[in-house]
Image (spheres, rainbow, N blue to C red):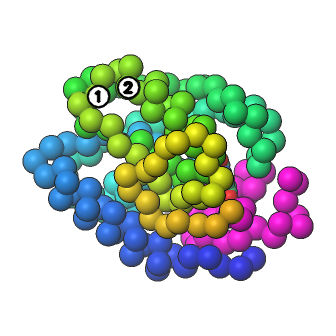
Amino acid sequence: MEVLFTKEQIAERVLALGAQISTEYAGKSVVLIGILKGAAIFLADLARAITVDNTFDFVAVSSYGRARVSSGAVKLIKDIDNPIEGKHVILVEDILDTGLTLSYLRGLMVHHKPASLKIATCLDKPDRRVVPIEADYVAFKVPNRFVIGYGMDYAEVYRNLSDIRLFPEELAEL
Ligand code: IMP
């Protein structure tokens, strides 16, 4: 499968995002909330690239419908473990695609009254957006193609690949 971003390119961008976040949150601590499962690997690398104190939490959502075609309904299946009231929170996602997942989660998190709430995403597919939402930190903007690797799956496979690859459209169940 064609490589879109090598592990070296990913590492470089993650380090740059970590440095930017560390500067912007200097003197503060940050709670990184990863969206399972896709963001786990990006969060693991980003957390280590951030030099200010940071803790992790994870949420899990299920979207109804098949992998590529979102029905628009998102359900929380695992909530945060620790309170985030008064904390500086960054939601960490693998791909910002239609925006439905992150706008749903952002709405939920706002209710917990964090001191601030931002979004970091490894990939951004702006062409696919159906709700207006933008990430504050983006490693790479990508065209509307299905990708796998670095946490991202096709039918739960390929998450462990170190680079990000294009999944052949003809094999994807659209
Ligand atoms: P959305 O922004 O609510 O449409 O959902 C984004 C989620 O869809 C991501 O967290 C991924 O789990 C999944 N997703 C979207 N595009 C891709 C892709 O190209 N490869 C793998 N998963 C994808």
Give the extent of the magenta segment. 145-174
Q: Which residue is mark 1?
A: 114
Residue 163 lies in quadrant? bottom right
User: In the image as oriented, which residue stretches furthest toward the left?
Assistant: 27
Q: Amino acid at mark 1?
A: Pro
Relative height, residue 166 to residue 110 (above, below): below
Q: Position of residue 166 (x, y in %)?
A: 71, 71
- Which image quadrant: the N terminus? bottom right
Left or right of residue 103, residue 170 in this image: right
**Ligand 1 is within 8 Å of the C-beta of the residue at disc 2:** no
Q: Residue sitting at 50 percent across and 48 percent down?
A: 93
Q: Is residue 155 magenta?
A: yes
Q: Residues within 10 Å of mark 1 (few under 14, many from 20)?
A: some
Are the two marked residues, 2 and 1, in contact with CB atoms closer than 8 angstroms? yes
Instruction: Answer yes or no: is residue 125 visible.
Output: yes
Q: Foreground: 143 or 76?
A: 143
Q: Secondary structure at mark 1?
A: loop
Q: Amino acid at mark 2?
A: Val
Q: Residue sitting at 45 percent across and 32 percent down?
A: 106
Q: Secondary structure at mark 2?
A: helix
Q: Residue sitting at 58 percent across and 40 percent down?
A: 131
Q: Residue sitting at 38 percent across and 25 percent down?
A: 110
Left or right of residue 114, residue 121 in this image: right
Q: Which residue is mark 2?
A: 110
Q: Position of residue 141 (x, y in %)?
A: 53, 66
